[in-house]
Image: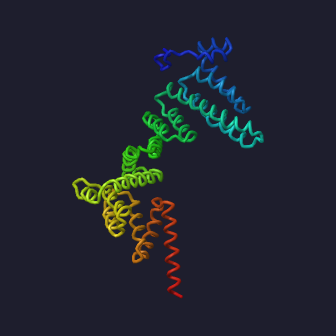
């Protein structure tokens, strides 16, 4: 019956047997397994309040062993180790005046509890593979604690494939994949698909997806601009089935390689006319027009309107350049008045 319910060849681990009294163990084999797990869950909570992390780990190991198909036990165990115990020793290491003790906390205790939390989450993901939750916890640890976007993206993808996974898990997968060096092409396929299904669907685009889309397109365009000749890029735009991204590659070549501002402006005009092109190309065109003294004033007015209408497509550097342009035009206007 246990096998049919997904418990495989279930029995408490040896560590759990050692920690349970004989009566409790007999009860766990019988019909009191859930009750005893709840008792040890309460004991773990009390140990947490006492900041007795060794006991927290011990009691969490018992509860997860007794009820391995109950995802919440694994989730709390991982949280207690990778976040609570980790944060406790991190804060303590910053306040202690003992240099040796501080070093031990930072280099031994913190990494140890981080690994224990990761182990709990991974074991839980094996026991409850049909739920997105524990795979997401593993991904969160790799992302937030280890700063490893590649492993995080793998686990976010795994989590997103569960039937109960909310949409933001797949967005997290796309975001972390976009941070992986050497995987820009793969990340662009995922991000662009997400961008288009969201942009032309009912859900709103997140700022992160917009930023990733622009950054990845810039990477692809710049790579092509530096590796292909002007003739090759022009032929790509003239061919059947060409897209706005082919024009973006040509525009980048004219800007970065040929230093042809006017030629690049004409290319970006064509991109903006394409209804499939992301909206940030409108901002880029106006920023290019603002480089020409003859077009600065009109470009500034258009940028101001665009900023009011779609502030989300402006990056920090764009706002800096916009402020410089505004300052320059105001200074020029005051000089003329004088």
Most extreme residue toward the bottom, as rendered? 338
Name the quadrant of the C terminus. bottom right
The percent coordinates of residue 128 (x first, y second) are: 50, 27
Q: Is residue 12 left or right of residue 154?
A: right
Who is closer to the viewer here, 97 or 187? 97
Q: Is residue 319 above or below residue 187?
A: below
| Residue 119: quarter of image | top right
Residue, x 49% and y 72% (percent of image)?
325
Location of residue 251 in the rendering, given as x and y in whole percent from the top left corner: 34, 61
Query: What kind of colouring is applied to the model shown?
Result: rainbow
Question: Outermost residue toward the left?
Answer: 240
* Numbered circles on residues, count: 0
In the rendered image, the vertical position of residue 258 relative to residue 216, given as above or below: below
Image point 37% across, 66% down: which residue? 259
In the visual, does 42 lie left or right of 238?
Answer: right
Measured from the top left, where is residue 101 in percent x and y? 74, 36
Image height of 181 relative to 273, above or below: above
**Residue 319 horizontal/vertical position (percent):** 50, 65
The residue positioned 36% from the left and 68% from the top of the image is: 261
Q: Residue at x 44, y 69 (%)?
A: 303
Left or right position of 31 against 176: right
Q: Look at the picture and state if 329 lies above or below 11.
A: below
Left or right of 334 in this view: 163: left
């Amino acid at each position: 019956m246990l096998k049919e319910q997904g418990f495989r060849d279930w029995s408490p681990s040896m560590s759990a047997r050692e920690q349970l009294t004989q009566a409790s163990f007999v009860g766990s084999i019988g019909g009191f397994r859930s009750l005893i797990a709840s008792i040890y869950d309460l004991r773990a909570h009390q140990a947490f309040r006492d900041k007795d992390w060794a006991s927290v780990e011990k009691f969490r190991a018992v509860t997860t062993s007794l009820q391995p198909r109950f995802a919440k036990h694994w989730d709390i165990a991982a949280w207690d180790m990778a976040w609570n115990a980790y944060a406790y020793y991190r804060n303590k290491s910053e306040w202690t005046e003992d240099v040796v003790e501080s070093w031990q906390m930072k280099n031994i205790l913190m990494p140890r509890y981080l690994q224990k939390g990761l182990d709990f989450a991974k074991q839980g993901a094996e026991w409850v593979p049909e739920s997105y939750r524990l795979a997401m916890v593993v991904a969160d640890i790799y992302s937030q604690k280890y700063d490893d976007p590649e492993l995080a993206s793998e686990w976010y993808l795994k989590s997103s494939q569960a039937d109960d996974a909310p949409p933001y898990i797949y967005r997290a997968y796309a975001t972390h994949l976009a941070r992986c060096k050497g995987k820009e092409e793969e990340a662009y396929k995922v991000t662009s698909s997400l961008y288009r299904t969201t942009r032309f669907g009912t859900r709103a685009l997140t700022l992160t997806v917009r930023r990733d889309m622009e950054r990845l397109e810039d990477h692809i365009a710049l790579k092509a601009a530096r590796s292909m000749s002007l003739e090759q890029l022009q032929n790509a735009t003239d061919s059947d089935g060409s897209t706005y991204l082919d024009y973006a590659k040509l525009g980048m070549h004219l800007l970065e390689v040929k230093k042809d501002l006017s030629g690049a402006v004409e290319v970006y005009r064509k991109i903006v006319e394409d209804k499939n092109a992301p909206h940030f190309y409108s901002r880029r065109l106006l920023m290019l027009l603002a480089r020409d003294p003859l077009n600065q004033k009109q470009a500034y007015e258009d940028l101001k309107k665009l900023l009011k209408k779609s502030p989300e497509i402006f990056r920090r550097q764009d706002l800096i350049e916009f402020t410089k342009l505004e300052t320059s035009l105001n200074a020029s206007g005051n000089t003329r008045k004088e």
